[in-house]
Each structure stands twice: as C-alpha cells, then as structure tokens.
Amino acid sequence: RKEVEQDPGPFNVPEGATVAFNCTYSNSASQSFFWYRQDCRKEPKLLMSVYSSGNEDGRFTAQLNRASQYISLLIRDSKLSDSATYLCVVVLRTGNQFYFGTGTSLTVIP
Amino acid sequence: SQTIHQWPATLVQPVGSPLSLECTVEGTSNPNLYWYRQAAGRGLQLLFYSVGIGQISSEVPQNLSASRPQDRQFILSSKKLLLSDSGFYLCAWMLSSYNEQFFGPGTRLTVL
C-alpha cells in the first residue's frame, strides 16, 4: 500500500471556480503535512503547511483530518495562474521520511 | 536568504557513461540534503539523504551513489548510466529543526 495517495486528475475548471483536492495517507504516525505546487518542468515549491486546526492563505485553505487520515487543499476563485500540479507531502514522526504524492493536475480554463 | 543551486540544468548522456550532478546550498549551515528523482508522470522518489558531511543514507539500491564532501555540497554520481536513470533529478535542503524541504531547479537527465 502506498504511503500517500492522490487523485491524479486532471481537474479542468473554469476561472473563478472552487476546486478541492484530497490526499490520503496510510501511516497514523505521520507528523507533518504540506502541499507543494509544481509547474511543468520545474521544481516543486512549498505552497503551504497543513496544521491540525486547518489554515488559510488567501484563496487557499488546507485541512487535516487525522481520524480519517487525509489532508485537503481548497482553492477558491481559481486563477489561470493556479494551473499546475499539486503535490501532497506526509512526514513521518521519525523524520527524514518524506512521502510525496504523485500529484494532482489542475488546469484553469479561461 | 537561502538559495540552492543545481547544475547542469539539462544533460544528455549515452548508456554506460558516468554521471556527476552537483548541488550547493547558500545562506545556511548544516542543512539536511536530499536527492530525489522524478520519472515522467511519476512521483518523487527519494534516492539519498545526508544529515552531515560524509553521512549518506541510501533509500533505494541502484547504480547511483552520493557524496557530501562539504557542509553545503551534495553530489550524485554514477559510474555507468542505465536507460532507466533518465528523469528529473532534484536536490532539496531542510533545516533539521523544521520539516519544510526546499528544492533546487533540478537537472533533467536523458540517457540514450
């Protein structure tokens, strides 16, 4: 069983739409969680951390559900510039054990 | 501020040739350093990580090796490349007190 699973998409949404991605993880000892954004043929860049209480950064909201072992990313009012692949990352408590999802592809259409 | 450099940006190598990719970090001391590979349409695969000079942990047995000759320098090598070594190689750093990793611009390797 994979440590982290993501729906690969693709998600094609119109500008202004709200879109949500989920990512499930298998190890209940997982300690830290992140969302990264990766543009085509570029390196992943940290988008935001995911805190237990949920956190928001502008149009982006990240949530963690430990009971069901998933994290989510909500993007409101989608912009063309949001088109990218979104990777979830789960870090085990023991450290240096980072597990990346395979990414969810988002295309925002004019 | 911290910056991470990788070179070369792209590389085309024949099967059986050697490989050396370099990664350097500026603006921080004693970072944890990582090498990942991302094959086309696949997720990131952790290859090696290092918590200090000369300390290398391998995650996946293969024909690649890594070295950390200096605090902020991480090198990925191979004596003989295979076709399956093609991919996007990413170096990342992290401070041990945090868990966010920051990636370099990557090296796109094509083995022919």
Image: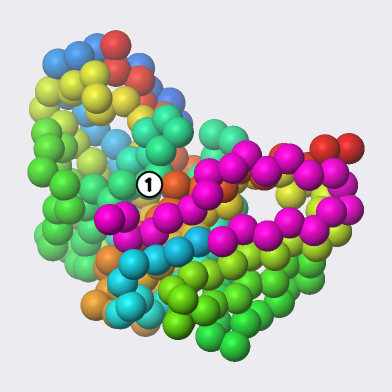
Height in image: A52 above or below B47?
A: below
Height in image: B111 above or below B61?
A: above
Q: Position of residue A77 (x, y in %)?
A: 85, 59
Q: Nearer the viewer, residue B57 or A69?
A: A69
Q: Quarter of the image containing the N terminus of chain A?
A: bottom left
In the picture of the structure, the residue carrying the numbered disc 1 is B44
Q: Nearer the viewer, residue A60 or A26?
A: A26
Residue farthest front in this picture: A68
Q: Describe residue B61's horizontal placement relative to residue B50 as left or right.
A: left
Which quadrant of the view contains residue B25? bottom left
Residue extent of the magenta highlight: A1-22
Q: Position of residue A56 (x, y in %)?
A: 71, 77
Which quadrant of the view contains residue A46? bottom right
Q: Describe residue B3's horizontal placement relative to residue A54 as left or right.
A: left
Q: Nearer the viewer, residue A97 or A62?
A: A62
Helix, strand or loop status at disc 1: strand
Amino acid identity at mark 1 = Leu
Residue shown at 85% from the left, 44% from the top? A14
Height in image: B23 above or below A24?
A: above
Residue shown at 53% from the left, 85% from the top? A52
Q: Describe residue A30's horizontal placement relative to residue A58 as left or right.
A: left
Q: Nearer the viewer, residue A70 or B82?
A: A70
Residue shown at 17% from the left, 63% from the top? B53
Residue shown at 41% from the left, 38% from the top? B42
Q: Is residue B104 visible?
A: no
